[in-house]
Amino acid sequence: MLRIAGSLASWDDPHNSLAQKQIMPGIRFHLPAHAPELVDFAYSPLLEAVLSLHVVVAPKHHPLQHPWVRRARRLSPELRREIGSFRFAYRVLMPDFVYPEADGFGAFEEELGRLRVLDAELAAFEFMRPLYDHGGAREPDKLRDPEIRTHVERRVAALGGDPDAARAIFDDPEGLLERFAALLEAYWEEAFAEEWERLEPRLADAVTESGRLIASEGVYALLNALWPRLRVDPSREEFGLDVPHHHDVTISEDRPLVLVPSAFVWPHVRVNCDEPWPASVIYPAPFVARDARRRIPDAELLRVLRALADDTRLRALKLIAERPRSTQELAPLVGISEAGLSKHLRILADAGVLDARRDGYYVLYSLVRERVEPLAETVLSFLERSES
């Protein structure tokens, strides 16, 4: 899966009772199309550091960031062990306290200082969030529930984290928070401060580029580019994720939407929907998205080839190459039901071969030529490459 992540628990967890009871109601943000004053931008060194730790512990999902994965192998053994101890905090989802404030572009030391003085009970619930979905209802009794505790400890063990850290969520959240902050501080000093010097000007440019797009074409032009990871419906002025966590968030002057470009979130999109944290969308910075389209990394080559290796999909793709088309238009031309064709189009879109944009009631699919044109060269490069 191209992981769609947000401020939720791990929904593929068979022990999560909430996941068993709910059937994909989803998170929905309601945002007027012509209200740029309700949209803020931010980027965050602390968030980017935590996202890079996700890349380190889940490298198969992040072929574009493999240079950082290789660099992380040179970290000190003590730091690598501690990164592994906290796998549960970033292997799938992350505590919401790593998201940036709505007002800005803070320095790492400033963000880390805010983290260190977080209320201990709130910290416990946020460390619990990637392991057990409490739906944003931070009821103190949950921290004393033996079934929840057992569930959290099992999830940490399944993710390969430190059992002592799992117990500290309930017994010593203040100490656990300081231990996590110390990990981030050591990681920053040993490796990520230098990486941030390289990234910060590029993320600043990404904010400028995204801001210009919103100013000229509206916020949904930016959000549409995140489909299919993000569900976007400009006609209803809403967007969100299809996940088993129901939450409707109305964006307003009191609660603006914070858009956060990131170098390390690709290929995912992450959201936060629960207070007291800002309503946020963490999205791949434009320079990362362009890089992903220009090159087809080896890890994705098979997925692209599989997407193309189907007669129905090739016939649909040939028609789409002529001009953008909707599912309703394509289905009778290809000779398949709309429902059946939608599955094929999703495979092509997930492989990056198709783009989609909403035009009123219809979703129009268009060919991403930059994704297909280098394919022959990439295949030949793969075949001719020495394995030594």
Image (cartoon, rainbow, N blue to C red):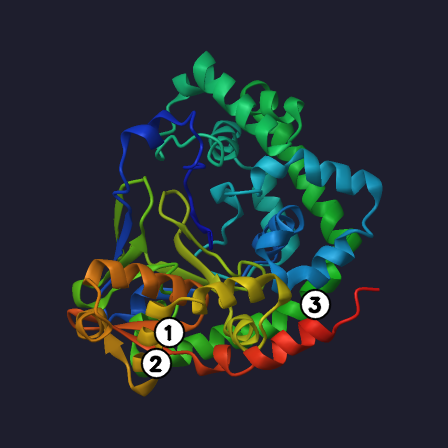
* Residue pointed to by mark 3: 197
**SS of the residue under disc 2:** helix
Expressed as whole percent of the image width and height from the top left, the position of residue 223 reads 35, 67
* Residue at x-position 20% and y-position 63%: 338
Q: In this view, does 197 lie above or below 126?
A: below
Kindly check if marks 1 and 3 are in contact, taking CB atoms under 8 A apart as contact. no
Residue at image coords 32%, 71%: 356
Secondary structure beneath label 1: helix
Report, in whole angstroms, how far the alpha carbon at label 2 lies from the one at label 3.
44 Å
User: Which tag, 1 or 3, sits closer to the chain's start?
Assistant: 3
What is the distance, in whole Å, between disc 1 and disc 2 at their CAs?
6 Å
Report the front residue among 48 and 72.
Answer: 72
Q: Quadrant of residue 35?
A: bottom left
Taking the view exactly as shown, the residue that stands out farthest to the left is: 361
Q: Is residue 362 left or right of residue 161?
A: left
Query: Where in the figure is residue 323, as x and y percent of width and height?
Result: 29, 85
The front one of 371 and 195 is 371
Q: Which residue corresponds to the image point at 84% horizontal and 45% vertical from the top-left?
A: 76
Question: Which residue is under mark 1?
Answer: 314
Q: Which amino acid does label 2 sit on?
A: Lys
Q: Which residue is drawn at 46% across and 62% down?
A: 283
Q: Quadrant of residue 227?
A: bottom left
Residue 86 picture location, percent across and down: 64, 36
Picture coordinates of residue 271 (x, y %)? 41, 52
Looking at the image, which is closer to me, 159 or 107?
159
Determine the secondary structure under disc 3: helix
Q: Residue 318 carries which label?
A: 2
